[in-house]
Image (cartoon, rainbow, N blue to C red):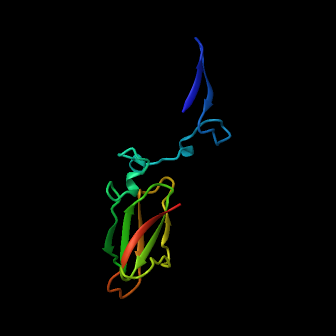
Amino acid sequence: MLKALATAATVVLAAQAPAAVTANGNLDPGEFLAVPVDAIRDSAGDSRLDRLMPERGFRAAAEAAPSGGLRLRWPAVPGKRYRVAYKNSLTDAAWLTDLPGSLVTAPASGGGNELEFLDATPGLAQRFYRIEVQP
């Protein structure tokens, strides 16, 4: 957002947001945070992002990884942290979060808008996963 003061002969920059970071006083392209509009859409207008709601757009995909194990992929909101939890049986009492790399943070900018996690645990007959958004 720019705020300019104008007279008949000149236009003077009175303020800009965000404030310039560089010494040259200009707002340069590298000083912007790019957030895909898709990632912050709230189509129902209920303050819940579509990317976090299964009924509106959150769909996780699972596929066999070439190196073995299972790869999970899901749409992400920039800057949000996610934790992959699992159970070996749905009758297990608690979801476990002890897999290496199970806490994943989406890049604030520049990265894609999808995250992935690889469960390289060998010899699994079955496993159930859930992806939790962290505060």
**Residue at image coords 37%, 82%:** 91
Report whether 12 appears left or right of 89: right
Report whether 115 appears left or right of 9: left
Q: Position of residue 106 (x, y in %)?
A: 48, 60
**Residue at image coords 41%, 51%:** 49
Give the residue furthest to the right.
Answer: 23
Q: Position of residue 26 (x, y in %)?
A: 61, 36
Report whether 79 appears left or right of 67: right
Q: Residue 34 versus residue 99: which sits nearer the camera?
A: 99
Q: Position of residue 87 (x, y in %)?
A: 40, 79
Give the residue furthest to the top.
Answer: 8
Q: Residue 94 versus residue 105: which sits nearer the camera?
A: 94
Name the image quarter holding residue 10: top right
Q: Position of residue 21 (x, y in %)?
A: 64, 42
Name the image quarter holding residue 18: top right
Above or below residue 125? Residue 103 is above
In this orientation, does residue 68 appear? no
